[in-house]
Image (cartoon, rainbow, N blue to C red):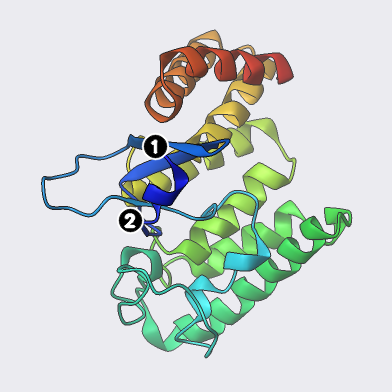
């Protein structure tokens, strides 16, 4: 498909398709069932892996007065979309301020390639504990907090494996089992299970990685990219 025709599609933070650019053309793959009159949507940016500065204020746009995304999910009143769902409104603003402060710091440090030593597993564990009962597990601020802890920082292998599995379950609740960013979680789980000599879990996540790559990239590219991931590991 030519890039000019892709302008007919919309951005969504909870997309129903994935997109990949190839020169002057793009490849669109459905990652959810799309009914006849549904608009095809894809995300212009990563939602939780990479912690990009450009999207870090998504969950702050109403509660803290920042600008943000205006897709159909994000334009809903804060707390009514799965990405912004809160369980305890009186406590939520303070927790969101603290959470987004941590995420913005991590984003800037990653952008300018500063060591992530300011963050510790214990600091983020305490933050995630504060979020319990206040932010729903589908809230993007909570998802990004856990992603920072287990995708960008190293820790105890057994603890990280449990956290990565939890993160995968949260991601699937919001975006479904075919969401491309799950590949980073699966790659990390493959690496950890290899270190722990857990052959059964290792094989399971290798198969999940290949399955997901096939949906997002097609059969030939999927095998190639999956092999590249395994070689890196």
Q: Can residue 69 be seen in the rendering of this structure?
A: yes
Residue plotted at (39% across, 71% down): 84
Q: Do the residues bearing badges 2 and 1 touch, measured as CB atoms within 8 Å?
A: no
> Can you see residue 119?
no
Tag 2 residue: 8
**Residue at the image point whose x is 88% and y is 53% from the top:** 115
Residue 60 location (% of width, % of height): 52, 79
Front one among 193 and 12 = 12
Q: Nearer the viewer, residue 67 or 135?
A: 67
Q: Residue most toward the left?
A: 36
- Left or right: residue 10 compared with residue 107: left
Q: Secondary structure at mark 2?
A: loop
Q: Quadrant of residue 127?
A: bottom right
Residue 62 relative to residue 37: left or right: right
The numbered mark at residue 209 is none
Residue 158, image x, y percentages: 62, 31
Per the model, the C-alpha gap separating discs 2 and 1 is 12 Å
Q: Which secondary structure lies at badge 1?
A: loop
Rate crowding at label 1 as few (under 14), some (14 to 19) or many (20 or more) other CA atoms within 10 Å: few
Direction from residue 31 to residue 159 in the image, left or right: right
Q: Taking 78 as reference, is 127 above or below it? A: above
Image coordinates for residue 16, horizontal then vertical, percent: 30, 46
Res 144 → quadrant: bottom right
Tell which of 51 and 27 is nearer to you. 27
Q: Is residue 108 above or below residue 188?
A: below
Residue appearing at x 55%, y 35% in the figure: 185
Q: Circle 1 sits on which residue?
A: 1
């Amino acid at each position: 498909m030519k890039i000019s025709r892709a302008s007919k599609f919309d951005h969504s933070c909870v997309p129903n398709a994935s997109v990949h650019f190839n020169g002057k053309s793009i490849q669109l793959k459905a990652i959810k069932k799309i009914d006849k009159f549904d608009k095809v949507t894809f995300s212009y940016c990563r939602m939780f892996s990479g912690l990009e500065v450009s999207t870090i204020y998504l969950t702050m746009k109403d509660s803290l007065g920042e600008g943000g995304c205006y897709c159909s999910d994000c334009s809903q009143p804060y707390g009514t979309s799965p990405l912004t769902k809160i369980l305890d409104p009186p406590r939520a603003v303070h927790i969101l301020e603290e959470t987004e402060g941590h995420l913005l710091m991590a984003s800037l440090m990653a952008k300018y390639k500063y060591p992530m030593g300011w963050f510790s597993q214990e600091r983020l564990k305490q933050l995630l504990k504060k979020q319990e009962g206040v932010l729903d597990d589908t809230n993007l601020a909570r998802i990004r907090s856990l992603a920072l802890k287990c995708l960008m920082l190293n820790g105890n292998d057994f603890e990280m494996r449990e956290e990565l599995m939890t993160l995968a379950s949260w991601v699937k609740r919001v975006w479904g089992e075919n969401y491309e960013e799950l590949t980073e979680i699966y790659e990390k789980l493959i690496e950890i299970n290899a270190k722990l000599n857990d052959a059964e879990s290792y094989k399971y996540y290798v198969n999940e990685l290949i399955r997901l790559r096939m949906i997002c990239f097609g059969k030939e590219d999927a095998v190639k990219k999956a092999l590249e991931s395994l070689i890196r590991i």
